[in-house]
């Protein structure tokens, strides 16, 4: 596990389902992913400048620094799209998502990686649209 993830757990790193990613990529034409799971990360996505149209699927055990950074990057006119656990009772949700981004709830549960069953929690798509 990379130190760059700031994750508390090694079991919360799951690949975004390809069909979900592709449908969002068609809409937003991503040019960056600050917390990818493919290959080794060569730099800390929390410390570098992000692209103009960004997708992120941060570690679910510690999304707070990622959603904070997403909001800050959106203030620079960038579009940030995140796949997040639908954890609406958390401080990070109220501080950096609620009334700051578009929220799209996903019907049903997301199937991550090569799992045989879906995630035991709901997920959502959050869009900080700094262009508007």
Image (cartoon, grey):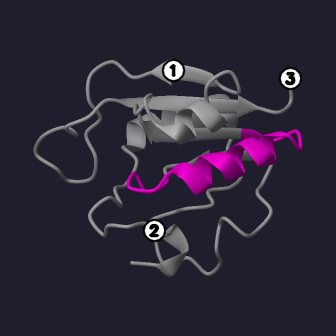
Nearest the viewer among 115 and 65 is 65
- Contact between marks 3 and 1 (CB within 8 A): the answer is no
Residue 5: x %, y % from top left: 50, 68
Q: Position of residue 53 (x, y in %)?
A: 74, 44
Determine whether, in the image, residue 14 is placed left or right of residue 24. Answer: left
Q: Which of 131 and 121 is in front in this view?
A: 121
Residue visible at 81% across and 41% down in the picture: 78
Q: Give the range drawn in magenta.
A: 58-79
- Identify the residue under disc 1: 104
Distance between mark 2 and mark 1 Cα atoms:
25 Å
Q: What element carries label 2?
A: loop
SS of the residue under disc 1: strand
Are circles 2 and 1 on residues that touch, CB within 8 Å? no
Q: In this figure, which residue is indicated by the disc labeled 2? A: 38
* Magenta residue check for 75: yes
Residue at numbered disc 3? 132
> Which of the two discs, 2 and 1, sits closer to the camera?
1
Residue 40 makes an appearance in the image: no
Quarter of the view holding residue 120: top left
Q: How far apart are marks 3 and 2 (CA)?
A: 31 Å
């Amino acid at each position: 596990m990379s130190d760059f993830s700031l994750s508390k757990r090694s079991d919360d790193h799951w690949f975004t389902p390809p069909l979900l990613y592709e449908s969002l990529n068609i809409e937003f034409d991503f040019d960056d992913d600050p917390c990818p799971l493919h290959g080794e990360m060569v730099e800390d996505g929390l410390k570098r400048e992000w692209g103009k149209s960004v997708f992120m699927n941060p570690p679910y055990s510690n999304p707070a620094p990622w959603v904070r950074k997403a909001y800050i990057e959106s203030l620079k006119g960038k579009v940030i799209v995140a796949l997040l656990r639908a954890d609406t009772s958390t401080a990070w949700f109220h501080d950096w998502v609620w009334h700051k981004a578009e929220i799209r709830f996903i019907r049903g549960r997301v199937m991550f990686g090569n799992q045989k069953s879906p995630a035991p929690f709901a997920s959502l798509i959050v869009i900080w649209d700094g262009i508007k």
